[in-house]
Amino acid sequence: MSTTADPNIIKLRNVRLSFPKLFVPEAVEEGGKLKYSAAFILDNTDHAQIIALIEKATERVALDEFRKKVPLRHKPLRDGNEFPDMDGYGNGVMFVSAKSDRRPVVVDSDSTPLTADDQRPYAGCYVHANIRLFAYDHKTGGKGVSAELRAVMFAKDGDSFGAGPVNADDEFNDVMADDMLN
């Protein structure tokens, strides 16, 4: 819920993390600007209140910016059915994608700063995150509301999305066995 002075800051709690680019920025499109980013998956039932808050805040941010109700080409909250075959997406979930030019604050559950070497947060874990909604009007892309990535806190482990980290012992077990024979 939003309890900060800025009503456009939305606090997401116990959401699944997907596509985290929290420590090293990446370009979304070839030749595009480098950005930090992440997607946050919200269960339609467990997060119904926050989903409603994001929808209401999206309407308010757009109205504040454009001074009238206008069709938005992009909204920050999207249906998980857009990606039915991806881990964590599909029926019963919504997701919010957020990005930033600046590196977001990334901390452990005790507020200790985390680095990429800590290997968390990772895709599939649960996090708390703060995002800030803002409106934009691109001449070629139309009007929309997007989300700025501000901060991420690791909350708890979850099933990793994708292949997960590689275990060196498993990868080189045959090489080590051959070395022992020679």
Image (tube, rainbow, N blue to C red):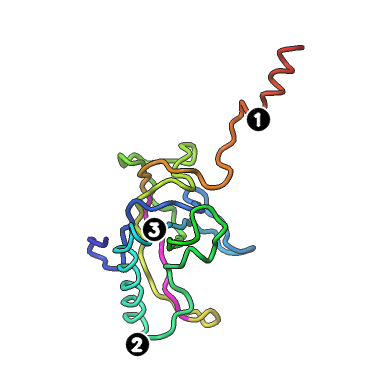
For the residues labelled 3 and 1, the Cα–Cα distance comes to: 35 Å
- Ranked by sequence position, the earlier of labels 2 and 3 is 3
Circle 1 packing at 10 Å, graded few (<14), some (14-19), many (20+), is: few
Q: Is residue 3 above or below residue 153?
A: below
- Disc 1 marks which amino acid? Glu
Q: Using the image as rendered, state which of residue 44 and residue 107 is in the foreground.
A: 44
Q: Main secondary structure of the magenta part?
A: strand
The residue closer to the viewer here, 31 or 180, is 180
Q: x%, y% of residue 140?
A: 55, 81
- Total marks shown come to 3
Outermost residue, bottom side: 68
- In the picture of the structure, the residue carrying the numbered disc 3 is 43
> Range of the magenta residues?
143-152
Along the line of sight, which residue is nearer the eye, 122 or 41? 41
Q: Is residue 164 magenta?
A: no
Label 3 vs 1, first from the N-terminus? 3
